Amino acid sequence: MAEWVKLREVSEAFLVPWDPSPPGEDFPRPPEEMFYRLLDTADTEHSQRFLICTLAEGAIVGQVSLNQIFRGPFWNCTTGYWVGQPFARKGYMTEGLRLCLAIAFQKFNLHRVEANIIPRNEPSKALVRRLGFRYEGTALRYLRINGVWEDHEHWAITREEWTPIGA
């Protein structure tokens, strides 16, 4: 817990502009509270959370979540992710999200993974483009971020469009 909390603390100014903020909740949330929420929702029917770590030291660099996992005729989820400021733009999230797409499509047999991104978040849009997501449109006032209802670009990839690791 201490390593995750410290990473969130040192990255707060970097992450808060992109963090969801449900109405009526204190924001930003204390990192300890966020960590316990991570544990509570890490492995459920509707959400999966993964820590992204370095191979050499095993240091936590960020997190990828598969959220709103739906079955039935939909077989879909949304993904959310963050990387700590000291590790940003070094390729860790590309590899972390690539591994989580493999889990979504191979382990959970999902058909579609979606990412919703604030239009000005160019690094996030570059990430999903690199991994084969396609832009599908913009949803107005889609998600409350840092206390403001923000528009989001809707990006998605289906199993048919995804390139498995090593292919």
Image (cartoon, grey):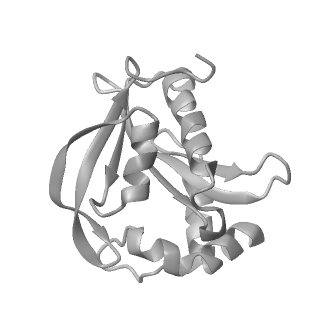
Query: Dividing the image into 4 quarters, which one contains the N terminus?
Result: bottom right
Choose between 151 and 29: the one closer to the eye.
151
Residue 165 shown left or right of residue 161 in the figure: right
Residue 71: % across, % down: 36, 28
Q: Can you see residue 15? A: yes
Quadrant of the image containing the C terminus: top right
Percent x, y of residue 4 = 69, 67
Indicate left or right for 23 with 122 as reference. Answer: left
- From the viewer's side, name the closer residue of 124 and 9: 124
Where's residue 60, x and y in %? Answer: 72, 59
- Looking at the image, which residue is at 38% across and 67% down? 20
Going 38% across and 38% down the picture, which residue do you hit? 77
Q: Can the viewer see residue 67? A: no
Q: Residue at x 23, y 67 (%)?
A: 150
What residue is drawn where x is 63% and y is 20%? 166
Q: Is residue 83 above or below residue 107?
A: below
Q: Nearer the viewer, residue 113 or 22?
A: 113
Q: Is residue 147 above or below residue 46?
A: below
